[in-house]
Image (tube, rainbow, N blue to C red):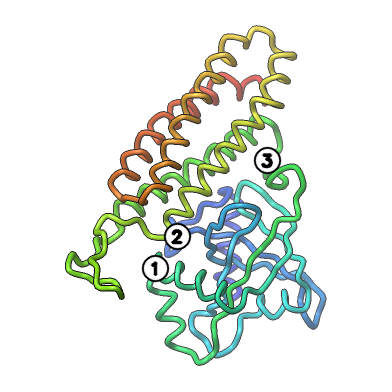
Amino acid sequence: MPHDFNQQIIDEFRARKGRVGGHFEGARLLLLTTTGARTGTPHTTPVGYLADGGDRVLVIASAGGSDRHPDWYRNLLAHPQVTVESGAFTYEARAVVLDGAERDEVFARAVEADPGWAAYQEKTTRVIPVVALYSLARGGPGNINASSFGEAMKVVHDAFRRELALIRAELADEPEPEPEAKTENGTGTDSGTLGAQLRINCLTFCQGLHNHHTGEDLALFPLVAEQHPDSAEALARLREEHERIAVLVEELRRVLATGTDRESTRTEVDRLATALEAHLTYEEAELIPLLT
């Protein structure tokens, strides 16, 4: 990408805490800062990523199908420690290039989610690298890109809203497989089967939401209760809502673990989205004034 074009995306991404418009609106993007292989200076690049659960995300060094690896990839080969900006969080990470069957499995997931990755691979003779970025942050997802506790709550909540909206859009837009399609052993495919990457997106969202609510229950809510005793009723309601949302999260996980049926998944995601939006809105109205 031309430098000026990249810089516009970087500036908008940072100003809007991970949201960008134009061609990349609705895409999963992060900002990756690497150390120049020859110069030793930092370089920041917007790149698409795949969720992978746990402590890592995945990026693909496609360079639009160029026969030359992108600069950021050559940089991280020389200096594997990088900085990742997700919109809500900034953290240090260790870059590991995947190889063999693991690389192929991840790339197949990427192609299933977006056939454009396959088009890039067809344009070049190089094997397009896949890189795992392992977070080095301890005890949390990294530094929140906010200047107050109140702003931090809104930034994190909006990140959950954005990811849930992407998942719902993917569930709505995922094309139906051909009903007569056959697997290698001759059996028909399930027309309702969820894509592998979409399933991982759902599971990653569930885990992130669980971690967020656990952190609030153990750290944030006791702090608010101590400093603002009159918040007891609101905190009690929020804890109850955490429990109800946890039940919905477990139901979604159960559906994902028992066949990944698309319609069942859509139903559970919609139930979770409705409950979660009401919860986030109430929490913001009650707590942000106390935290700002």
Q: Nearer the viewer, residue 264 or 171?
A: 264
Across and down, in percent, residue 215 comes to 66, 32
Across and down, in percent, residue 106 comes to 51, 69
For the residue marked with disc 2, what is the amino acid?
Gln
Report which residue position mark 3 lands on.
146
What's the CA distance linking mark 1 and mark 3? 35 Å
**Image quarter for residue 126?**
bottom right
Secondary structure under tag 3 reads: loop
Between discs 2 and 3, the one toward the N terminus: 3
What's the CA distance linking mark 2 and mark 1? 7 Å
Q: Which mark is residue 30?
A: none
From the viewer's perspective, is residue 203 above or below residue 82?
above
- Specify the farthest residue to the left: 180
For the residue marked with disc 3, what is the amino acid?
Ala
In the picture, the quarter occupied by the N terminus is: bottom right
In the picture, the quarter occupied by the C terminus is: top right
- Specify the farthest residue to the top: 230
Residues marked 1 and 3 touching at CB (< 8 Å): no
Task: State whether residue 147 appears in this view.
Answer: yes
Across and down, in percent, residue 265 comes to 35, 45
Secondary structure under tag 1 reads: helix
Report which residue position mark 1 lands on.
112
Between discs 2 and 1, the one toward the N terminus: 1
- Specify the farthest residue to the right: 40
Across and down, in percent, residue 141 comes to 68, 46
Task: State whether residue 25 appears in this view.
Answer: no
**Image quarter for residue 68?**
bottom right
Report which residue position mark 2 lands on.
197
For the residue marked with disc 1, what is the amino acid?
Glu
Residues marked 2 and 1 touching at CB (< 8 Å): yes
Q: Nearer the viewer, residue 187 or 130?
A: 187
Q: Nearer the viewer, residue 185 or 135?
A: 185
